[in-house]
Amino acid sequence: MAGLIPVDEIKRLQKRMNRFVEDVGVELENRYPEEYKQIQHRMNKIMEDFETTTGKGLSLESMMPLADIVESDEDLVVTMDLPGVDKSDVEITIADDQLSVKAVRETETSDEQYHRRERTCTRYERIVKLPVAVKGDEAKASLKDGVLEITLPKEEVTIRKRVTIE
């Protein structure tokens, strides 16, 4: 599932890392107390950042599409992969300094007898903290071939000036 991070996989990884630290912790804590504290601090920071980025309301059945953010002098362009999603099933909201994208992909149900059925309903949810203030009312979005592209004009347009050394 390239391009997607299942939220439950991240939580499982956190539990495995916690178990690993508990199993090896006594030896590490006695031999390398400062390094042990740094490892714990980094793991906690990673999970805090993840929860802040995704939003605490993300459900376990949701996938978090990866986002690319490109900044130019005039705007920000956010690109996400939403495979199999129709544009009518995408909800984009901009509030304060956050962009929220929610989408649902549903496959049709039929009376066929499946040997395996894995492609049912998928929810995509992502909250992205925007690095600069944007004009939300002037935002434009397009969805083509499963790729969502959102163009957000910046509040203040920054023009780069070259400074010469005297």
Image (cartoon, grey):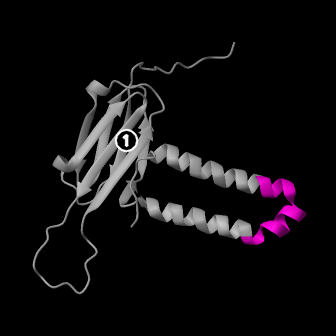
Percent coordinates x, y for residue 51 in the rendering: 51, 48
Judge left or right: residue 113 versus residue 132: left
At horizontal 20% and vertical 62% (from top left) the residue drawn is: 106
Percent coordinates x, y for residue 9 in the rendering: 48, 65
Task: Name the foreground residue: 52 vs 81.
Answer: 52
Q: Report the magenta stretch's main SS.
A: helix
* Quadrant including the C terminus: top right
Asked whether 35 falls inside the magenta stretch, the response is yes
Residue under pointer 1: 78
Give the amino acid type for the residue marked by disc 1 in the picture: Val
Judge left or right: residue 132 versus residue 122: right
Judge left or right: residue 112 versus residue 75: left
* Quadrant including the N terminus: bottom left
Task: Name the foreground residue: 130 vs 105.
Answer: 105
At horizontal 87% and vertical 60% (from top left) the residue drawn is: 32
Asked whether 133 falls inside the magenta stretch, the response is no
Q: Magenta residues, as a range? A: 23-37
Find residue 164 and report its image quarter. Answer: top right
Task: Name the foreground residue: 135 vs 40.
Answer: 40
Few, some or many C-alpha atoms within 10 Å of disc 1 (few <14, some 14-19, many ≥20)?
some
Percent coordinates x, y for residue 84 in the rendering: 23, 60
State whether residue 33 is above or below residue 94: below
- Element on which disc 1 rests: strand
At horizontal 58% and vertical 47% (from top left) the residue drawn is: 48
Q: Tag count in the figure?
A: 1
State whether residue 134 is above or below residue 41: above
At horizontal 69% and vertical 70% (from top left) the residue drawn is: 20
Judge left or right: residue 131 versus residue 36: left
Percent coordinates x, y for residue 35 in the rendering: 81, 56
Find residue 65 and report its image quarter. Answer: bottom left
